[in-house]
Amino acid sequence: MLAAFVTQANPSDPLAALQVGDRPDPEVPEGWVRVRVRATSLNHHDLWSLRGVGLPAARMPMILGTDAAGTTDDGRDVIVHAVLASPGWTGDETLDPRRTLLSELHQGTIADYVVVPAGNVIDKPSALSFEDAACLPSAWLTAYRMLTRNELSGGDTILVQGSSGGVASAAIQLGKLLGLRVWATARTPAKQAFALELGADGAFASGDRLPDRVDAVVETVGEATWSHSLRALRPGGTLIISGATSGYSPPAELNRIFFLQLRVQGSTMGTREELVELVDLLVTSGVRPRIDRVLSLDAAADGLAALEAGDVLGKVVLTTRT
Ligand SMILES: NC(=O)c1ccc[n+]([C@@H]2O[C@H](COP(=O)([O-])OP(=O)(O)OC[C@H]3O[C@@H](n4cnc5c(N)ncnc54)[C@H](OP(=O)(O)O)[C@@H]3O)[C@@H](O)[C@H]2O)c1
């Protein structure tokens, strides 16, 4: 089958590590299902994998990808849940210390087929296209959990750091859908305009002084925006962080955290139940992910190059040969 995969990581030039070509068709273990991937979407996670972050050499070759929508061998249209709990784990799988994401221990989704435990698929409603559905399991689920598990209520103001990214664009759209006032930052005027187009109530250059303090910050950028995020919060506000694209070591500014009684809340992906909730929300609201472009799987390199260059507004989707 055709797949995008990595055999040897390249920490400084991730695209040089990308291979697109034939991989063996997967075996289907007992209790697992095979999904014919119809659409998959790219995430920054795929670039981390190509750099070897979270992916030791012993696990390669590894097919990239955490997101997929497709059809099982028995003809069921499904969305794949990317978080795999360890055998025997019960409860919130994101809290399982031995959980993995597809493409970390088990082969990923940027391929003609992916195999997952039977519990890791949910029904894809016909109202959602395969392309839209393929955007949900990582970026959208992450944004959904960040906004729904942190005591935010209608009328609260959030700041989304970055606008064009998968998680950031989802957080803007979902924030509005959940009744929040949404401000966003972006590095270019075009990306600020994109935030407004997605429904943001205000868009600012990265690091700009805001008109007021916010109740919570949705942080995925990390080092480059951390100080601004802390400065943006009202006393008692919450910094919700799920990523650190620009670096992991900002000055901690502990004094600001305790003096203003800020809460720093980590967040990772979401549960299967949260994915079901998210799908229902999209179906009932009519809101759909903003897709920048749809490419065929064999053009994965073009999509990943655009993602690395930051030349994407929303999500990049790849479709397979049907
Ligand atoms: N913990 C989890 O479960 C989880 C889940 C999903 C993602 N993540 C992490 O979250 C991060 C975002 O993922 P993604 O797939 O949404 O990435 P993406 O689509 O590539 O988006 C990158 C985002 O980062 C912003 N950005 C990058 N460098 C920046 C800088 N130097 N200054 C300001 N903004 C910068 C961009 O903002 P502009 O709009 O200004 O360009 C854009 O919004 C990644 O690090 C990823 O690994 C974690």
Image: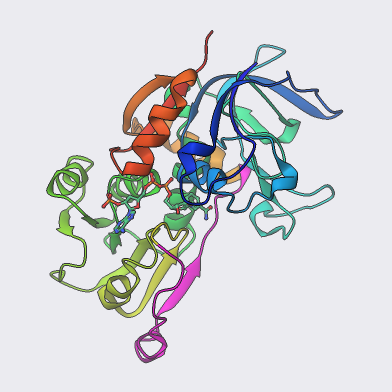
Q: How many marks?
A: 0
Q: Is residue 219 left or right of residue 75?
A: left
Q: Is residue 267 magenta?
A: yes
Q: Is residue 103 above or below residue 154?
A: above
Residue 274 in the image: x percent, y percent?
55, 45
Q: Is residue 290 left or right of residue 210?
A: right
Quadrant housing residue 97: bottom right
Residue range highlighted in magenta: 247-272
Q: Residue at x 45, y 63 (%)?
A: 241
**Residue sitting at the far top:** 322
Quadrant housing residue 290: top left
The answer to whether residue 151 shows anywhere in this view is no
Quadrant housing residue 32: top right
Q: Is residue 36 magenta?
A: no
Q: Nearer the viewer, residue 73 or 279?
A: 73
Residue 224 in the image: x percent, y percent?
32, 66
Residue 203 in the image: x percent, y percent?
16, 55
Q: Is residue 312 above or below residue 77?
A: below
Q: Is residue 74 above or below residue 69?
A: above
Q: Is residue 176 above or below residue 236?
A: above
